[in-house]
Image (tube, rainbow, N blue to C red):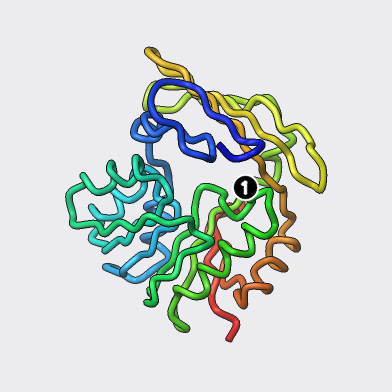
Amino acid sequence: MREGYEGTGPGAITPDGCAVDLYTRLSVGEEPDVVAGAVPAGAHILELGSGAGRVTRPLLDRGFRVTAVDESAEMLEKVAALDGGVRTVRSPIEKLDLDEKFSVVMLASFLVHSGDVAVRRGLLRACRSHVTDDGCVLIQREGADYHTNLPRERVDPGGYTVRILSADPVGDGVNQVRAEYVFPDAVWTQTFLARPLTPEQFEEALAEADLKVDKYLTDDGTWVRAVPKS
């Protein structure tokens, strides 16, 4: 388990506190629709941080090809079981080197908000090094009040409750966030480190990796299409 990260609940827990059994249960939200509206039909998508395939499955159903990357063998076992011929690659994202490029690279799950600046830089370098010069990178950002509108909860249509309980400062602009997922038959928690980024800080981070914003895809700015600067 990484320092500052923790997960509780049934089943295997990954080094960043994610419960594999939980991620097989989570509902898919607007992500597939956002992706489908932002990239060419049938594109080959490099999905960085696929988890158990929550978003992978509907992307395959929409006719996209997907190469799914995750550091967890347990997560990738779930992805490999999906219909549609998805390719899986086990690797930390920041160390990925496939020696090939994709027309679409996707970095979801707020990974760009990694509490470790070096890791964030590695994530964005991986995005840039694996996208074609005329391709795009789709990035999911936190909402503006993610760390301040607390505690908060929502009841998912899938029949479970998600609670963001706290976001406590731990230094250097990083917060330790604690989340809880309550199902009728099980409860999981996840504790992780996240660095809030203003739009300006986010765009500066992109520029460091030779990327720039092409378009904010959602009204709340949580989904962004970035393109290579050069």
Q: From the viewer's perspective, is 32 left or right of 153? A: left
Q: Position of residue 94 (x, y in %)?
A: 53, 61
User: Which one is nearer the viewer's eye here, 73 or 56?
Assistant: 73
Please tell me in which quadrant of the rendered image residue 193 appears.
top right
Q: Which residue is mark 1?
A: 142
Q: Residue at x 61, y 35 (%)?
A: 5
Q: What kind of residue is marked 1?
A: Glu
Element class at badge 1 = loop
Q: Is residue 24 or residue 4 the one in the foreground?
A: 4
Q: Residue at x 73, y 39 (%)?
A: 175
Residue at 62% over, 57% down: 119
Task: Determine whether, in the image, residue 230 is placed left or right of residue 21.
Answer: right
Q: Residue 183, located in which quarter of the rendered image?
A: top left
Residue 109 is situated, as x and y percent measured from the top left of the image, at: 51, 47
**Number of marks drawn:** 1
Are there few (<14), some (14-19), or many (20+) residues within 10 Å of tag 1? many
